Image (tube, rainbow, N blue to C red):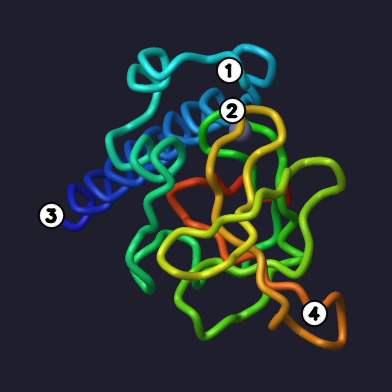
Amino acid sequence: MKKIAIIILLFSLASCQGQEKKKNKETEISQQPVKGKLNMNTTDAEWKKVLTEEQYEVLRQKATERPFTGEYYKNFEKGVYVCAACGNPLFTSDAKFDSPCGWPSFDQAIKGSVIYKEDKTLGMTRTEVMCANCGGHLGHVFDDGPEETTGNRFCTNSVSIKFIPSKK
Ligand SMILES: [Zn+2]
């Protein structure tokens, strides 16, 4: 009886590992930067095909995800955050800080990875941050970030970015 239990345990462990490996492989494939393929010239119809409804709303229609709901606002693992639309590397985990605002917050972007635009909607003047490769809306940058570093807070939608953990 004990032997059977052990065999079953081994089998289930083996299948767990199998699944995990498969999962990793899939993640790696989808993590391949598709820079160049999707860019500023990509049409709305094409974006609708490659993005989820939520991603389209935020990245292309400039919607904002609800605070404290995003996938990454509490993620502090080592790695790189890339554009969820085109794979352009945007932020490193070293730039991320624990902001009480409820959105993933960074004190700086990777050089040349983002572009800025004045945003006067909602009765405010803010600086919109977009992916420099595809123009996808990421969020806004404010000057209330950590004083000991840059003082900037790149307030970013989790929907707009994708985290790639560092290889251990
Ligand atoms: Zn992009």
Tell me the residue that label 1 is attached to.
38
Q: CA distance from mark 3 to mark 2?
A: 54 Å
Q: Please tell me the numbered disc located at residue 165.
A: none
Q: Please tell me the numbered disc located at residue 86.
A: 2
Q: What's the amino acid at mark 3?
A: Met
Q: CA distance from mark 4 to mark 1?
A: 32 Å
Work out whether 163 lies above or below 53: below
Q: CA distance from mark 3 to mark 4?
A: 64 Å
Q: What's the amino acid at mark 4?
A: Gly
**Quadrant of the image occupied by residue 104:** bottom right
Q: Earlier in the sequence, mark 3 or mark 4?
A: 3
Provide residue 148's location: percent of width, then percent of height.
Answer: 87, 87
Ligand 1 contact, mark 2 (Cβ < 8 Å): yes
Q: What's the amino acid at mark 2?
A: Cys
Q: Earlier in the sequence, mark 4 or mark 2?
A: 2
Mark 4 vs mark 2: in front: 4
Tell me the residue that label 4 is attached to.
151
Ligand 1 contact, mark 1 (Cβ < 8 Å): yes
Q: Secondary structure at mark 3?
A: loop
Q: Secondary structure at mark 2?
A: loop
Q: Earlier in the sequence, mark 3 or mark 1?
A: 3
Q: What's the amino acid at mark 1?
A: Leu
Mark 3 vs mark 1: in front: 1
Tell me the residue that label 3 is attached to.
1
Q: Earlier in the sequence, mark 4 or mark 1?
A: 1
Q: Residue at 65% across / 25% down in the picture?
A: 33
